[in-house]
Image: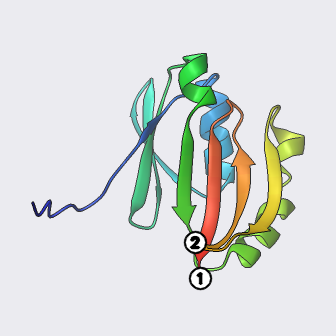
Amino acid sequence: MNHNAKSIRPFIGSKDFEVSCSFYRDLGFEENVLSHDMSVFKSGNQAFYLQRAYVKDWIDNTMVFMEVDDVKSFWDKLVTLGLPEKYEGVRLVPIREMDWGRECFVHDPSGVLWHFGEFF
């Protein structure tokens, strides 16, 4: 089957929608408000939906992987943003090298785990 897919956009939730919107804007995503309880955040041709919805088991098990060109450069810029100091619950985990590539991690204010990585 050929999907002819143009994009794939996951839906993620938020414990505090306004805080999460601010966090993702600070992280460099462009926000397009869709309604009072949903926005789409874009980076280039990639996007995800952020919802004003919180189910602890769902959020605690949500992970998103975003491939970047240069994870070292991404990390260097990421640490200058001071996100853990600005947002409660945000954690950054430095770059780890794996057999497939390297990645760093960001826990958003709600607990969603982001992997930012590059493949070898």
Precedes in sequence: disc 1 or disc 2: 2
The C terminus sits in image quarter: bottom right
Judge by depth and name the residue closer to the eye, 78 or 117: 117
Residue 40 percent location from the top left of the image: 42, 44
> Separation of disc 1 and disc 2 at Cα?
12 Å
Could you tell me residue 61's position as x and y percent? Answer: 58, 31
Residue 75 drawn at (x, y percent): 77, 68
From the viewer's perspective, is the residue at label 1 or at label 2 nearer? 1
Labels in figure, total: 2
* Residue at screen point 63% across, 49% down: 114
Q: Pick the quarter of the image with the N terminus.
A: bottom left
Q: Give the residue displayed 45% in from the left and 24% down from the top.
A: 37
Q: Is residue 49 above or below residue 92?
A: above
- Compared across the picture, whether 89 is left or right of 115 comes to right
**Residue type, label 2:** Val
- The amino acid at mark 1 is Phe
Please tell me which residue is depicted at 63% across the width and 35% down the height of the picture.
20
The crowding category of the residue bearing disc 2, from other C-alpha atoms within 10 Å (few below 14, some 14 to 19, many at least 20), is some
- Viewer-side residue, 71 vs 96: 96
| SS assignment at label 2 | loop
Q: Residue furthest right?
A: 85
Q: Residue at x 84, y 61 (%)?
A: 79
Q: Residue furthest top?
A: 55
Residue 37 placement, left or right of 59: left
Please identify the quarter of the rendering in which residue 96 is found. bottom right
| Above-or-below relation of 119 to 34 | below
Q: Which residue is mark 1?
A: 120
Q: Residue 70 location, x and y as percent?
A: 65, 79
For label 2, the residue is: 68
SS state under label 1: loop
Which residue is more in the foreground, 117 or 30?
117
